[in-house]
Amino acid sequence: MSRRALTLLVAGFLTVILAVAAAWLPVPYVVLNPGPTENTIGEVKGKPVISISDHATYPTEGKLSMVTVAYQGGPGNAIDLITALRGWLDSSIAVVPEETIFPRTSTPKEIEQQNSLDMTTSQEAATIAALHALKIPVPEVVSVVAVEKGLPADGKLQLGDEVTAVNGTAVSNQNAVAEAVRKAKPGDQVRLTVNRKDAPVDVTLGTVAGDDGKARVGVTMGMRYKPPFKVDISVGDIGGPSAGLMFSLGIYDKLTPGALTGGKSIAGTGTISVDGAVGPIGGIEQKMAGARKAGATIFLTPARNCAQALRAAPEGLRLVKVETLDGAIKAIDALRTGTGDVPACTGN
């Protein structure tokens, strides 16, 4: 073999080795796959997803499924180029830059904590939206939402405490609490009556001068809804806010006679606000693929996701456009009865 041929052979061999090695090197991307699909009117690991106490509930049937997105990759668990290339070739999988899922300004733990908080907030909003749709009155209470370290309230007031009175005078909103505290002179004491774990507790606090010279105790108040009965939602370690609509529908179905779905397998997604507005979400392609794989034939789609959803809708999955919880309920009623309009997604 000539020196030239040997050189080319060695160079070719090294090129192949380098290419193979490069294919297994980590790349800064995350692969998004269809995640678990859970029936909100069903069970997960033998436990109801939605449990309601101290109020009449009714049997349900069919499915009102929430859908999720699973991911591969991220800080400390990077994917290789081969995995990324496989994802790019699969229409049900998305490959996105790592920073779109894990912003450089946040640690993975902080992102996990935020996803957990978003899920909790979504569940609370879903409960209130469903009760509003059912015309069930939901009172608001003054609640402790933050306590400043080193100030009088630190160690004495707890997050979630419901403030009902200041110095024996009933209060109905956070402004009334603030005004009552400011009436004291810095250095004086104020007595707050709070509802803690459904029991009244009197808490006496000293006061300090704020930047404006007025008395303060170092606590931030907010208004929150307090449902008249208990609604528990349990979906394990799933996070994020995008199941809000399906939680609301599940609660509504359990609190009303008859099966909302009429036995149909319905999936969907969308954030929810306490007034029932449905908002857009991410990962619509993966969520639709997961829904269809789980047997859903109808997919409730946030209006602002419709154009994107139409481009990737799996065969056999009917996209129903929803903008509000009330609109979603009416659309499902129309699907069940065969009468009335069912809003469809369009490309507009």
Image: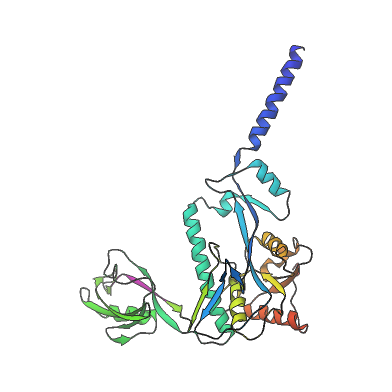
Q: Residue at x 68, y 61 (%)?
A: 290
Direction from residue 30 to residue 120 in the image, left or right: left
Q: Nearer the viewer, residue 342 or 217?
A: 342
Q: Is residue 23 left or right of residue 347?
A: left
Residue span colored magenta:
217-222
The answer to whether residue 219 is magenta is: yes
Q: Quadrant of the C terminus?
A: bottom right
Count of numbered labels shown in the rendering: 0
The residue located at (73%, 51%) in the rendering is 90
User: Based on the displayed image, in which of its 4 quarters is residue 346 positioned?
Assistant: bottom right
Vertical side of 137 occupied by 40: above or below: above
Quarter of image, res 332: bottom right
Give residue 149's position: percent from left, percent from top: 31, 63
Q: What main secondary structure does the magenta stretch of the protein show?
A: strand
Rendering coords of residue 124 (x, y %): 51, 74
> In the displayed image of the protein, which residue is found farthest to the top?
2
Q: Is residue 342 left or right of residue 50?
A: right
Query: 50 above or below 97?
Result: below
Relative image position of residue 338 (x, y in whole percent): 78, 82
Residue under the point 69% across and 54% down: 93
Residue 274 appears in the rendering = no
Image location of residue 242, percent across then percent down = 59, 67
Viewer-closest of 110 and 82: 82
The reply to whether residue 229 is visible in this rendering is: yes
Q: Is residue 44 magenta?
A: no
**Applied colour scheme:** rainbow
Q: Is residue 322 shown above or below 98?
A: below
Q: Residue at x 28, y 86 (%)?
A: 168
Q: Quadrant of the N terminus?
A: top right
**Observer-nearest of 180 and 46:** 46
